[in-house]
Image (cartoon, rainbow, N blue to C red):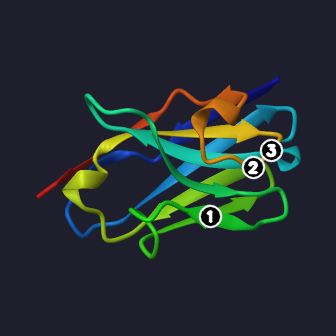
């Protein structure tokens, strides 16, 4: 079992930055690929980015060039720059044994952290 806890969300103005953290406990997260997803009110959960065990990354087109995912020991980070109102959502990290952009592939999920971007 892997327990994931996200933190770092908040209310910011458009153009600001936030860094989300995903801290793992239980089994080491270094054995898993980790994805970031987000879900806005009334919308489906959508893929944002992932980082593989070896550090390779992939981003959704909507965040490419603005968001950066990284990992260090038992924590994964999502640096979010140039935030836009449309980035407003609950952000989740998730761990998987394979590399997926679909949420169904992920075994373990955090509880989410709210990010709100005002215009």
**For marks 2 and 1 on the same chain, the one whose residue lies earlier in the sequence:** 1
Q: Residue at x 20, y 55 (%)?
A: 85
Quarter holding residue 45: top left
Q: Residues within 10 Å of mark 1 (few under 14, many from 20)?
A: some
Residue 24's spot in the image, x, y percent?
Answer: 73, 38
**Given contact means CB atoms under 8 Å apart, are the residues at marks 2 and 3 in contact?**
yes
Q: Position of residue 106 (x, y in %)?
A: 69, 34
Query: Is the C-beta separation of discs 2 and 1 under 8 Å?
Result: yes
Cα distance, mark 2 to mark 1? 10 Å
Q: Quadrant of the C terminus?
A: bottom left
Numbered disc 3: secondary structure: loop
Q: Is residue 116 left or right of residue 29?
A: left
Residue at 77% from the left image edge and 66% from the top image edge: 55
Q: Earlier in the sequence, mark 1 or mark 3?
A: 1
State how far apart marks 1 and 3 are (Cα). Answer: 13 Å
Question: Residue at position x 20%, y 64% from top?
Answer: 14
> Taking 102 as reference, is 51 left or right?
right
The mark found on residue 99 in the picture is 2
Q: Quadrant of the N terminus?
A: top right
Marking on residue 98: 3
* Labelled disc at residue 58: 1
Say left or right for 114 vs 29: left
């Amino acid at each position: 079992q892997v327990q994931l806890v996200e933190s770092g969300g908040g209310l910011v103005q458009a153009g600001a930055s936030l860094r989300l953290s995903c801290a793992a406990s239980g089994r080491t997260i270094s054995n898993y690929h980790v994805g970031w997803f987000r879900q806005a009110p009334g919308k489906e959960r959508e893929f944002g980015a992932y980082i593989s065990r070896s550090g390779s990354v992939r981003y959704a087109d909507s965040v490419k060039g603005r968001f950066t995912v990284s990992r260090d020991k038992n924590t994964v980070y999502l640096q979010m720059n140039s935030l836009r109102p449309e980035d407003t959502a609950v952000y989740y990290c998730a761990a998987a044994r394979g590399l997926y952009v679909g949420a169904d592939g992920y075994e373990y999920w955090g509880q989410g952290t709210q990010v709100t971007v005002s215009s």
